[in-house]
Amino acid sequence: MIDTLGMPRALSGAQGTLADTMVAAESGDLHALSVALLIGSAVLITAIAAVRVSTRSGLPSLLIYLGIGLALGNRGLGIDFSDTELTQVLGYAALVLILTEGGVTTKWDSIKGSLAPAAALATVGVVVSIGVVAVAARFVLDIPWNAALLVGAILASTDAAAVFAVLRKVPLPRRISGMLEAESGFNDAPVVLLVTALAAHTAGTGGLSWGSLAITVVVELVVGSAVGLAVGWLGGRLMAKAAGGSSALFAIGVVTISVLAYAAADVIHASGFIACYLASLVLGNMGLPHRASVLGFSTALGWLAQIGLFVLLGLLADPAGFPSVLLPAIVLGLVLLLVARPLSVIVACTPFGLSWRSQAFLSWAGLRGAVPVVLATVPLTLGTEGVEWIFNLVFVLVVIFTLVQAPTLPWVAHKLGLDTSHHSVDLSVETTAFDDIGAHLMEVAVGPTSRISGVQIYELRLPPGANVALVVRDGISFVPKETTPLRRGDQLLIVTPAAVRATVEKRLYAVSRGGRLAGWSKPGSAPTS
């Protein structure tokens, strides 16, 4: 008898039972599904509309999403949700998608000069921050050192979603913006490992010494990094060869590879978050086709993950517990903002020669968001006793200091004189593959600093078979001649054989940076135009 398939019972004439089951499903489960879809759709539409309010007010949209969750919760419309384990699982899943979006949309050129100080901030800076906040928590909250270190670790990570959403709207020097983006992508991994280990130790389920803990964290980060780089590179090569002309399927494949990197690293007990971010970073900078579709799909998933995560955290929070943690949250937040973060920046970044203005802005821009709130559920899921208050403390701290920091970032950047030296993208190249005919269509946008301006079409010296098929200038399209000069702001459509697409892209970037004589200059000399 095969109960799971139901074949013998169906064949024995149990038609009434089947009909009853269908009616029950329609009236019960399907009705619940309809209600869930109704609420979910309303939340998403409200969240999308809230982006406009966020843009006008300067407040990060995460606060609005948290507010929606609170409004839906047991103190609002009455949805009773208290499953911390499910919140942690869904929170980690959302963070994977957020890191994927951050990695795919980050250009290597914008962060390559910032990797060393960003890595120092994500490691040495995290340790300094944990120590300072732990000392404050020990005496302000009068709690044991284990719990104080746990609070410090939970609050140590800057938030990728908050940083990507806010800082990309602030014109900053390339090195500063690159440091903040890379730091937010890197520091989730060590902090997650430390919080999990400290929570287990506090709960009495982990017996690692401090030396063993440090070695474990380093090994997991190194192995996770290796897995992420390998999966990203191999997956990108596979997608470039195996994927067809469908841009939608290609985008799904790229995001799936990033998720695969997280899962592969986590299964072997390495850092899945660092693997996911590095795999995404590799994929986003491999010059893969369908880049516009990949960016659009990953950004959409990132937004969906952010909305779902913050609404879920708002649902889990209980406003009745906020008053008791309000004062401690403000005190610890001030210690974090005015002491721990600046000290971690000074210790981590001084060896790299950053000016005091840059360090001051980095200190103010250490935004906290969903990551600390999600990590505050870890002690609860591990059964750590006496720390139930941590979730409300972290929730209140994040809300208050996001309200203080995020809207003032443009003003702080202006006062420090950092908003006048931002860079402009000199050239943007997007590629669509047509595998059936062995050709690629490249869409090229000439930026305001590109030295392609004034270069005639024939001076691009593109490989044989590659041609500029169309130029769009001031909204008017035309087929160019060989002697047509290009201008800043032009958009070009270039048709090229698949075999020389990489050469065409390399040539375009060379001319954009070196002018018409790029490649003809003597070795060691600067190109001239």
Image (cartoon, rainbow, N blue to C red):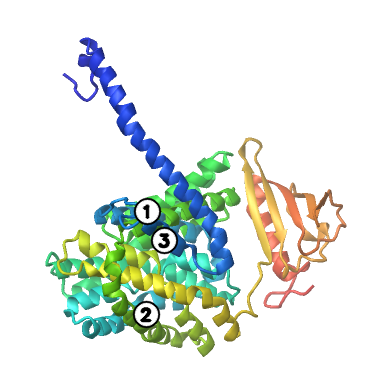
How far apart marks 2 and 1 lie (CA) works out to 37 Å
> Vertical placement of 429 versus 386: above or below?
above
Q: Which residue is mark 3?
A: 67
Upstream in sequence: badge 2 or badge 1: 1
Upstream in sequence: badge 1 or badge 3: 3
Residue at position x 30%, y 31% from top?
A: 28
For this view, does 223 lie left or right of residue 507? left
Q: Which residue is mark 2?
A: 125
How far apart marks 1 and 3 lie (CA) works out to 9 Å
Q: Residue 117 falls in which quadrant of the image?
A: bottom left
State the image coordinates of residue 341 (x, y, percent, origin top left).
39, 82
Q: Tag 3, which secondary structure? A: helix
The kind of residue on which mark 2 rests is Gly
Q: Which residue is mark 1?
A: 72
Could you tell me if the residues under marks 2 and 1 are in contact, i.e. CB atoms within 8 Å?
Answer: no
Residue at position x 58%, y 52% from top?
A: 291
State the image coordinates of residue 169 (x, y, percent, origin top left).
58, 68
The kind of residue on which mark 3 rests is Gly
